[in-house]
Amino acid sequence: MAGLTTQDAQFTRLKFIPYKDVTFNEGNPVFDDTKQGTPYTVMFNPNNIAVKLQVEWDAQQADGTINAPLKFKKIQPQDYSFEFVIDGTGATGDKRDVPEDIKKFLSTVYEYDSAEHTPHYLKITYGSVLLKCILKSVDITYNLFAANGKPLRAKVNASFTSCADPLLSEAIKNSNSPDMTHVRMLKTSDKLIGIANKIYKNNTYYVEVARANNFDTFRNLPTSTEILFPPVSKT
Protein backbone atom coordinates (compact mmCIF):
# COMPACT_ATOMS: atom_id res chain seq x y z
CA MET A 1 0.00 0.00 0.00
CA ALA A 2 1.37 3.42 -0.94
CA GLY A 3 3.14 5.23 1.83
CA LEU A 4 2.81 2.46 4.40
CA THR A 5 5.64 0.31 5.72
CA THR A 6 4.51 -3.13 6.84
CA GLN A 7 5.81 -5.22 9.70
CA ASP A 8 4.74 -8.58 11.13
CA ALA A 9 0.98 -8.24 11.52
CA GLN A 10 -0.67 -8.84 14.85
CA PHE A 11 -3.76 -7.41 16.50
CA THR A 12 -3.04 -4.15 18.23
CA ARG A 13 -4.54 -0.74 18.74
CA LEU A 14 -3.43 2.39 16.98
CA LYS A 15 -0.52 3.89 18.95
CA PHE A 16 1.40 7.16 18.73
CA ILE A 17 4.99 7.04 20.05
CA PRO A 18 6.93 10.33 20.44
CA TYR A 19 10.64 10.77 19.64
CA LYS A 20 13.07 13.61 20.15
CA ASP A 21 14.45 13.86 16.62
CA VAL A 22 14.04 12.70 13.03
CA THR A 23 16.47 9.79 13.39
CA PHE A 24 13.87 7.95 15.52
CA ASN A 25 16.76 6.48 17.48
CA GLU A 26 15.50 3.94 20.01
CA GLY A 27 17.76 5.58 22.58
CA ASN A 28 15.90 8.88 22.25
CA PRO A 29 12.20 8.23 22.86
CA VAL A 30 10.68 11.14 24.76
CA PHE A 31 9.14 8.94 27.42
CA ASP A 32 12.49 7.62 28.68
CA ASP A 33 13.31 10.72 30.67
CA THR A 34 10.11 12.71 31.08
CA LYS A 35 6.51 12.08 32.04
CA GLN A 36 5.35 14.34 29.23
CA GLY A 37 4.85 12.93 25.75
CA THR A 38 4.29 9.30 26.72
CA PRO A 39 2.90 6.94 24.03
CA TYR A 40 -0.82 7.30 23.40
CA THR A 41 -3.05 4.34 22.48
CA VAL A 42 -6.52 4.96 21.07
CA MET A 43 -9.67 3.63 22.73
CA PHE A 44 -11.18 2.38 19.46
CA ASN A 45 -9.27 1.68 16.25
CA PRO A 46 -10.17 3.80 13.21
CA ASN A 47 -12.16 2.24 10.38
CA ASN A 48 -9.80 3.61 7.73
CA ILE A 49 -6.50 5.35 7.11
CA ALA A 50 -6.40 8.07 4.45
CA VAL A 51 -3.14 8.50 2.52
CA LYS A 52 -2.62 11.61 0.38
CA LEU A 53 0.09 11.62 -2.30
CA GLN A 54 1.00 14.89 -4.02
CA VAL A 55 3.21 15.77 -7.00
CA GLU A 56 4.08 19.43 -7.58
CA TRP A 57 4.46 20.68 -11.17
CA ASP A 58 5.67 24.03 -12.51
CA ALA A 59 2.76 25.40 -14.56
CA GLN A 60 4.45 28.64 -15.65
CA GLN A 61 4.45 29.36 -19.39
CA ALA A 62 5.31 32.27 -21.63
CA ASP A 63 2.66 34.72 -22.80
CA GLY A 64 0.98 33.68 -26.03
CA THR A 65 1.72 29.96 -25.67
CA ILE A 66 -0.84 27.15 -25.50
CA ASN A 67 -0.55 23.90 -23.55
CA ALA A 68 3.07 24.39 -22.55
CA PRO A 69 4.52 21.18 -21.08
CA LEU A 70 4.53 20.99 -17.30
CA LYS A 71 7.88 20.62 -15.59
CA PHE A 72 8.25 18.37 -12.59
CA LYS A 73 9.25 20.22 -9.39
CA LYS A 74 9.03 17.79 -6.48
CA ILE A 75 7.09 15.06 -4.73
CA GLN A 76 5.46 16.39 -1.59
CA PRO A 77 5.68 14.46 1.70
CA GLN A 78 2.86 11.99 2.10
CA ASP A 79 -0.04 12.91 4.39
CA TYR A 80 -1.92 10.45 6.60
CA SER A 81 -5.29 11.06 8.29
CA PHE A 82 -6.94 9.17 11.13
CA GLU A 83 -10.33 9.61 12.75
CA PHE A 84 -11.10 7.96 16.08
CA VAL A 85 -13.54 8.31 18.97
CA ILE A 86 -13.04 8.73 22.71
CA ASP A 87 -16.03 7.68 24.80
CA GLY A 88 -16.70 8.52 28.45
CA THR A 89 -20.22 7.10 28.80
CA GLY A 90 -19.24 3.49 29.48
CA ALA A 91 -21.87 2.32 26.99
CA THR A 92 -19.39 0.03 25.22
CA GLY A 93 -17.99 -1.52 28.37
CA ASP A 94 -14.93 0.71 28.27
CA LYS A 95 -14.79 4.21 29.68
CA ARG A 96 -12.31 7.08 29.65
CA ASP A 97 -12.19 10.54 31.12
CA VAL A 98 -12.57 12.43 27.84
CA PRO A 99 -10.85 15.75 28.77
CA GLU A 100 -7.97 13.86 30.41
CA ASP A 101 -7.60 11.54 27.43
CA ILE A 102 -7.53 14.47 25.00
CA LYS A 103 -4.82 16.05 27.17
CA LYS A 104 -2.73 12.86 26.96
CA PHE A 105 -3.11 12.68 23.18
CA LEU A 106 -2.07 16.31 22.69
CA SER A 107 0.88 15.84 25.06
CA THR A 108 2.15 13.11 22.73
CA VAL A 109 1.52 14.56 19.27
CA TYR A 110 1.11 18.33 19.64
CA GLU A 111 2.84 19.89 22.65
CA TYR A 112 6.06 21.81 22.06
CA ASP A 113 9.23 20.09 23.28
CA SER A 114 11.16 22.90 24.99
CA ALA A 115 14.44 20.97 24.87
CA GLU A 116 14.28 20.24 21.13
CA HIS A 117 12.37 23.45 20.19
CA THR A 118 9.85 21.50 18.12
CA PRO A 119 6.81 19.26 18.56
CA HIS A 120 7.62 15.56 18.84
CA TYR A 121 8.49 13.33 15.92
CA LEU A 122 6.14 10.36 15.88
CA LYS A 123 6.06 6.69 15.09
CA ILE A 124 2.50 5.54 14.47
CA THR A 125 1.90 1.81 14.73
CA TYR A 126 -1.29 -0.01 13.81
CA GLY A 127 -1.16 -3.75 13.19
CA SER A 128 1.18 -4.24 10.23
CA VAL A 129 1.42 -0.49 9.56
CA LEU A 130 4.35 1.68 10.66
CA LEU A 131 4.49 5.40 9.89
CA LYS A 132 7.20 7.94 10.74
CA CYS A 133 5.83 11.46 10.71
CA ILE A 134 4.97 14.73 12.43
CA LEU A 135 1.61 16.27 13.24
CA LYS A 136 0.08 18.50 10.57
CA SER A 137 -3.30 19.30 12.14
CA VAL A 138 -5.82 17.98 14.63
CA ASP A 139 -9.57 18.70 14.86
CA ILE A 140 -11.44 17.74 18.03
CA THR A 141 -15.25 17.67 18.07
CA TYR A 142 -17.04 17.24 21.40
CA ASN A 143 -20.51 15.87 20.66
CA LEU A 144 -21.95 14.68 23.99
CA PHE A 145 -21.93 16.40 27.38
CA ALA A 146 -22.91 15.64 30.97
CA ALA A 147 -25.37 17.88 32.83
CA ASN A 148 -22.44 19.81 34.32
CA GLY A 149 -20.99 20.47 30.84
CA LYS A 150 -18.18 17.91 31.00
CA PRO A 151 -17.54 16.28 27.58
CA LEU A 152 -18.56 12.62 27.44
CA ARG A 153 -17.60 11.88 23.86
CA ALA A 154 -15.13 13.33 21.39
CA LYS A 155 -14.22 12.67 17.77
CA VAL A 156 -10.58 13.28 16.86
CA ASN A 157 -9.53 13.84 13.26
CA ALA A 158 -5.73 14.10 13.01
CA SER A 159 -3.49 14.54 9.98
CA PHE A 160 0.24 13.81 9.84
CA THR A 161 3.02 14.43 7.33
CA SER A 162 5.72 11.84 6.65
CA CYS A 163 9.32 12.64 7.46
CA ALA A 164 12.62 10.86 6.94
CA ASP A 165 16.14 10.97 8.28
CA PRO A 166 18.12 13.51 6.15
CA LEU A 167 20.60 10.74 5.32
CA LEU A 168 17.84 8.69 3.73
CA SER A 169 16.35 11.70 1.90
CA GLU A 170 19.76 12.62 0.46
CA ALA A 171 20.27 9.04 -0.69
CA ILE A 172 16.94 9.00 -2.51
CA LYS A 173 17.62 12.38 -4.14
CA ASN A 174 21.14 11.50 -5.23
CA SER A 175 20.10 9.53 -8.32
CA ASN A 176 23.08 10.72 -10.41
CA SER A 177 25.71 9.42 -8.03
CA PRO A 178 28.31 7.05 -9.53
CA ASP A 179 27.21 4.61 -6.83
CA MET A 180 23.64 3.91 -7.83
CA THR A 181 20.86 3.74 -5.27
CA HIS A 182 19.42 0.23 -5.16
CA VAL A 183 16.09 -0.99 -3.85
CA ARG A 184 15.60 -4.62 -2.89
CA MET A 185 12.67 -6.54 -1.46
CA LEU A 186 13.67 -9.23 1.00
CA LYS A 187 12.93 -12.81 0.04
CA THR A 188 12.56 -15.67 2.49
CA SER A 189 16.25 -16.59 2.63
CA ASP A 190 17.67 -13.07 2.28
CA LYS A 191 19.70 -11.34 4.96
CA LEU A 192 20.52 -7.63 5.05
CA ILE A 193 24.22 -8.31 5.66
CA GLY A 194 24.48 -10.60 2.64
CA ILE A 195 22.71 -8.25 0.22
CA ALA A 196 24.74 -5.24 1.41
CA ASN A 197 27.95 -7.21 0.91
CA LYS A 198 26.87 -8.18 -2.61
CA ILE A 199 26.00 -4.61 -3.62
CA TYR A 200 28.93 -2.78 -2.02
CA LYS A 201 31.51 -5.57 -2.21
CA ASN A 202 32.18 -4.83 1.44
CA ASN A 203 30.88 -6.58 4.55
CA THR A 204 30.79 -3.50 6.82
CA TYR A 205 28.18 -1.24 5.19
CA TYR A 206 25.09 -3.08 6.47
CA VAL A 207 25.00 -0.86 9.59
CA GLU A 208 24.80 2.30 7.44
CA VAL A 209 22.05 0.69 5.34
CA ALA A 210 20.01 -0.15 8.45
CA ARG A 211 20.46 3.42 9.71
CA ALA A 212 19.47 4.94 6.34
CA ASN A 213 16.25 2.90 6.36
CA ASN A 214 15.48 3.77 10.00
CA PHE A 215 15.54 0.08 10.95
CA ASP A 216 15.77 -0.68 14.65
CA THR A 217 17.78 -3.81 13.86
CA PHE A 218 19.43 -5.46 10.85
CA ARG A 219 18.49 -8.95 12.01
CA ASN A 220 15.29 -10.91 11.36
CA LEU A 221 13.71 -8.38 9.00
CA PRO A 222 10.30 -9.57 7.73
CA THR A 223 10.05 -11.13 4.28
CA SER A 224 8.96 -8.60 1.59
CA THR A 225 10.51 -5.68 3.50
CA GLU A 226 11.59 -3.07 0.93
CA ILE A 227 15.13 -1.84 1.60
CA LEU A 228 16.90 1.15 0.11
CA PHE A 229 20.65 0.66 -0.44
CA PRO A 230 21.92 4.23 -0.88
CA PRO A 231 25.27 5.39 -2.19
CA VAL A 232 27.73 4.96 0.66
CA SER A 233 30.83 7.08 1.07
CA LYS A 234 33.94 4.91 0.79
CA THR A 235 36.38 7.57 1.93
Image (cartoon, rainbow, N blue to C red):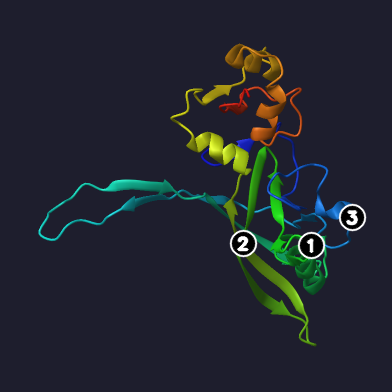
Q: Is residue 204 left or right of residue 30?
A: left
Left or right: 71 as drawn, with respect to 167: left
Residue 88 visible in the picture:
no
Q: How many marks?
A: 3
Mark 2–mark 3 distance (CA, rounded to whole Å): 26 Å
Q: Amino acid at mark 2?
A: Ala
Residue 58 visible here: yes
Residue 200 picture quarter: top right
Marking on residue 158: 2
Q: Nearer the viewer, residue 232 or 186?
A: 232
Near mark 2 (Cα within 10 A), the count class, few <14, some 14-19 or many ≥20, is some
Q: Which sits earlier in the primary sequence, circle 2 or circle 1?
A: 1
| Residue 149 position by quadrant | bottom right
Q: Which residue was labeled with disc 3?
A: 33
- Furthest residue to the bottom? 148
Q: Residue at x 27, y 55 (%)?
A: 59
> Label 3 sits on what residue type?
Asp
Q: Are marks 2 and 3 in contact (CB under 8 Å)?
A: no
Callout 1: few (<14), some (14-19), or many (20+) C-alpha neighbours within 10 Å?
few
Crowd class of label 3 (few under 14; some 14 to 19; many from 20; radius 10 Å): few
Q: SS of the residue at dot 1? A: loop
Measured Cα–Cα span from mark 2 to mark 1: 24 Å
- Determine whether 216 is above or below 193 in the image: below
Tell me where residue 39 appears, x and y as whole percent.
Answer: 80, 54
Q: Position of residue 214 (x, y in %)?
A: 68, 37
Q: Quadrant of the C terminus?
A: top right
* Residue 115's disc number: 1
Q: Is 193 situated above or below 81?
A: above
Closer to the eye: label 2 or 1 = 1
